[in-house]
Image (cartoon, helix red, strand yellow):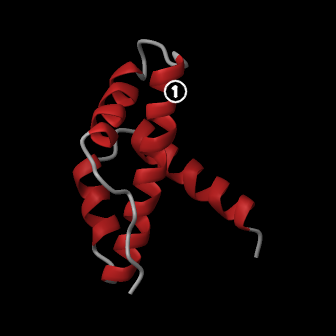
């Protein structure tokens, strides 16, 4: 198992899905339709994305295409006391 290759394949599948007009609501529902521990882990991926986007906002590493994502991610992190997710 190569985690780097698996992650790339999953990211590419998601890109293809959203690029072809796939419903974000349906995708979100499918992501959440899983074991609760796995949902917690998937949410951790979302938080990691937020951390990177927020950092990009702070360093000016964005353009008009993703400015809103970076700005909103920064606002989310600025209004969150803890990013620690328990693993039970």
Instruction: Estimate the x, y position of residue 60 in percent, counting from the top left.
Output: 51, 15
Task: Classify residue 41 as left or right of residue 79.
Answer: right
Q: Quadrant of residue 65?
A: top left
Q: Position of residue 42 (x, y in %)?
A: 42, 65
Disc tally is: 1
Residue placed at 50% from the left, 18% from the top? Answer: 62
Q: Is residue 65 above or below residue 30?
A: above
In this view, the residue farthest toward the front is 81
In this orientation, which residue lies closer to the viewer: 57 or 27? 57
Relative to 43, residue 74 above or below: above
Task: Give the position of the N terminus as an image quadrant.
Answer: bottom right
In the depicted structure, whether residue 44 falls above or below residue 64? below
Q: Nearer the viewer, residue 16 or 67?
A: 67
Residue for point 44% across, 33% down: 54
Assign the C terminus to one quadrant of the image: bottom left
Question: Which residue is farthest top?
Answer: 64
Q: Residue at x 41, y 53 (%)?
A: 46
Q: Position of residue 66 (x, y in %)?
A: 42, 23
Which image quadrant for residue 18?
top left
Drawn side of residue 81 relative to residue 10, left or right:
left
Q: Residue furthest bottom?
A: 88
**76 on left or right of 84:** left
Circle 1 — which element? helix
How many C-alpha atoms fall within 10 Å of the one at disc 1: few (<14), some, or many (≥20)? many
Q: Nearer the viewer, residue 88 or 33?
A: 88
x then y, percent, for residue 70: 40, 28
Q: Quadrant of residue 43?
A: bottom left
Q: Which residue is mark 1?
A: 56
């Amino acid at each position: 198992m190569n985690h780097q290759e698996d992650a790339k394949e999953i990211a590419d599948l998601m890109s293809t899905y959203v690029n072809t007009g796939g419903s974000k609501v349906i995708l979100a529902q499918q992501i959440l339709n899983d074991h609760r521990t796995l949902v917690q882990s998937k949410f951790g991926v979302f938080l990691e994305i937020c951390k990177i986007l927020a950092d990009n906002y702070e360093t000016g590493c964005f353009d008009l295409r993703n400015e809103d994502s970076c700005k909103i991610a920064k606002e989310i992190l600025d209004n969150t006391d803890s990013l620690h997710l328990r693993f039970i």
